[in-house]
Image (cartoon, coloured by chain):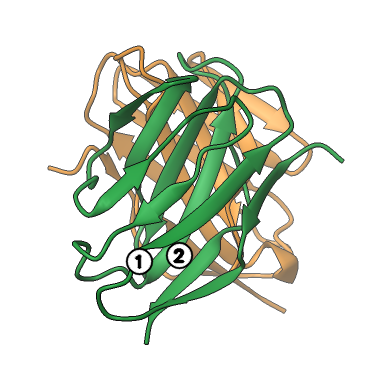
Amino acid sequence: QKEVEQNSGPLSVPEGAIASLNCTYSDRGSQSFFWYRQYSGKSPELIMFIYSNGDKEDGRFTAQLNKASQYVSLLIRDSQPSDSATYLCAVHGSSNTGKLIFGQGTTLQVKP
Amino acid sequence: DGGITQSPKYLFRKEGQNVTLSCEQNLNHDAMYWYRQDPGQGLRLIYYSQIVNDFQKGDIAEGYSVSREKKESFPLTVTSAQKNPTAFYLCASSGIAGGDIQYFGAGTRLSVL
């Protein structure tokens, strides 16, 4: 079992729809969770982070964390073609090293 | 302008050659990281450093070496022992090694001639 798992996709949604991206992790002691967006050929950029159970909203983005079920999700409301990218889930494990474990990423395609 | 600068943007390596990728940050971050990304894959950790003059191996350190002589700089050398070096290399830094947000440079794309 991979430490951080994501469906590689592609996930295709029409413009204006809600895109839902999911991520599961294996280290039950994980404390911090991050979503990065990566456009083709570019470096990852942070879009959301969440530390506590529940929802965290920032504009059109909502991160959801459920530690008991060991999953974290990202919802993108009113999806735009500019949201088309690969979304990387990253988890900071229980060891105090600063290391992030990345999933392989989910490719999102928003069709006009 | 605060940030992480990686150079060069593109790099070509000849057979048997060592090459060094530069990473400089002016964010006053303590921790720095090197990742490798292959097409369609996530990021894999090569080396990381939490403090000057100290660094640790990540998951795929074989064929790579690093140094951390200054807080701002964390260069990565891809040695001739790395038989499959073609990849996108990303440097990141964070303020507190125990869980702070990692920010990335623009990356270096390395290819073999």
Identify the residue at horizontal 30%, vertical 17% (top origin). A68
How far across and down, in percent of the image, does residue A99 sit? 38, 28
- Can the viewer see residue A102? no
User: Which shade of the palette goes to chain B?
Assistant: green
**Residue B26 appears in which quarter of the rendering?**
top right
Identify the residue at horizontal 32%, vertical 45% (top origin). B65
Q: Is residue A16 left or right of residue A14?
A: right
Task: Please name the amino acid that badge 2 sits on.
Answer: Phe
Label 1 belongs to which residue? B38
Q: Counting other residues with Cα less than 10 Å from the Cα at mark 1, is it few (<14), some (14-19), or many (20 or more)?
A: few
Secondary structure at badge 2 equals strand
How far across and down, in percent of the image, does residue B23 sit? 58, 46
- Look at the picture and state if B70 lies above or below B20: above
Which tag, 2 or 1, sits closer to the chain's start? Answer: 1
| Quarter that holds the C terminus of chain B | bottom left
User: Which shade of the palette goes to chain A?
Assistant: orange
Identify the residue at horizontal 57%, vertical 59% (top origin). B107
Identify the residue at horizontal 54%, vertical 40% (top origin). B92
| Quarter that holds the N terminus of chain B | top right
How far across and down, in percent of the image, does residue A81 sit? 72, 71
Q: Chain of mark 1?
A: B
Q: Chain of mark 2?
A: B
Secondary structure at badge 1 equals loop
Q: Nearer the viewer, residue A69 or B109?
A: B109
In three-dimensional space, the C-alpha distance between marks 2 and 1, rounded to whole angstroms, equals 6 Å
How far across and down, in percent of the image, does residue B99 sit? 48, 18
Disc 2 vs disc 1: which is toward the camera?
Answer: 2
Label 2 belongs to which residue? B88
Assess whether mark 1 and mark 2 are in contact (beta carbons under 8 angstroms): yes
Task: Please name the amino acid that badge 1 sits on.
Answer: Asp
